[in-house]
Amino acid sequence: MSRLSLDFYKQDAITVAEKLLGKILVRTWEDGTTSRYLITETEAYLGEEDLACHASKGRTLRTEVMYGDGGHIYVYLIYGMYWMLNLVTGTVGHPEAVLIRGLDNIIGSGKVGRELKIDKSFYGDDLWVSSRIWIEDAPEALHIIPAVRIGIDYAGEEWKNKLWRFILDKHI
């Protein structure tokens, strides 16, 4: 399979979050081996107006990569131990990203980060040219379950109840 084009990531986060389901995340390890994972769950974060999005607090050193072109990696640490893997989407000046919440039988964004050995060094990686992580195309997922995003009560009723989490229904 071929890598997803940069144009793919220039779409809005909601569209990309849905379309990523069923695609293949590829991780090359330090010893030269490669692992492939089916993307099974994502969450969309749609810019400064989305109070659950880190960019809602404005442009900072932490969120800087989100203000660039889609197709780069945005990582951040939670609870001092879990690195969250996000793919920047959209165009310059419109900070959007998709959180990878599930791969194959790995459920939970913290577990995804641990499985992939994500750390701060991934911040800003370009998915088109990275030699250690990228996304490969695969047939479009046909059975998707929309759901509310997890762990964002702080964003208020409107934003926490958006159906911007997407789950690949593998039971159909």
Image (spheres, rainbow, N blue to C red):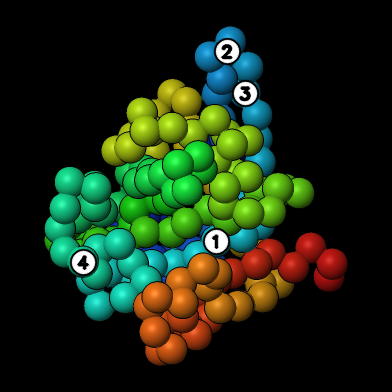
Find disc 3 in the rendering and name its residue: 34
Query: Foreground mark, 1 or 3?
Result: 1
* Quadrant (top left, top right, bottom left, bottom right) of the N terminus: top right
Instruction: Give the x, y percent position of residue 13.
Output: 39, 66
Q: Kindly indicate whether the residue at mark 3 contacts the one at mark 4 (C-beta within 8 angstroms).
A: no
Q: Amino acid at mark 4?
A: Lys
For the point 66% across and 41% down, the residue is 37
Q: Which mark is residue 32?
A: 2
C-alpha separation, residue under disc 4 versus residue under disc 3? 37 Å
Q: Which mark is residue 42?
A: 1
**Dot 4, crowdedness within 10 Å: few (<14), some or many (≥20)?**
some
Q: Kindly indicate whether the residue at mark 3 contacts the one at mark 2 (C-beta within 8 angstroms).
A: yes
The single residue placed furthest to the right in the displayed view is 171
C-alpha separation, residue under disc 2 versus residue under disc 3? 7 Å
Along the line of sight, the residue nearer the viewer: 128 or 167: 167
Q: Amino acid at mark 2?
A: Gly
Find disc 4 in the rendering and name its residue: 57
For the point 57% across and 13% down, the residue is 32
For the point 25% across and 63% down, the residue is 55
Q: Earlier in the sequence, mark 2 or mark 1?
A: 2
Q: Earlier in the sequence, mark 1 or mark 3?
A: 3
Instruction: Give the x, y percent position of residue 35.
Output: 65, 29
Query: Foreground mark, 4 or 1?
Result: 4
Q: Amino acid at mark 1?
A: Thr
Instruction: Give the x, y percent position of residue 5.
Output: 40, 46
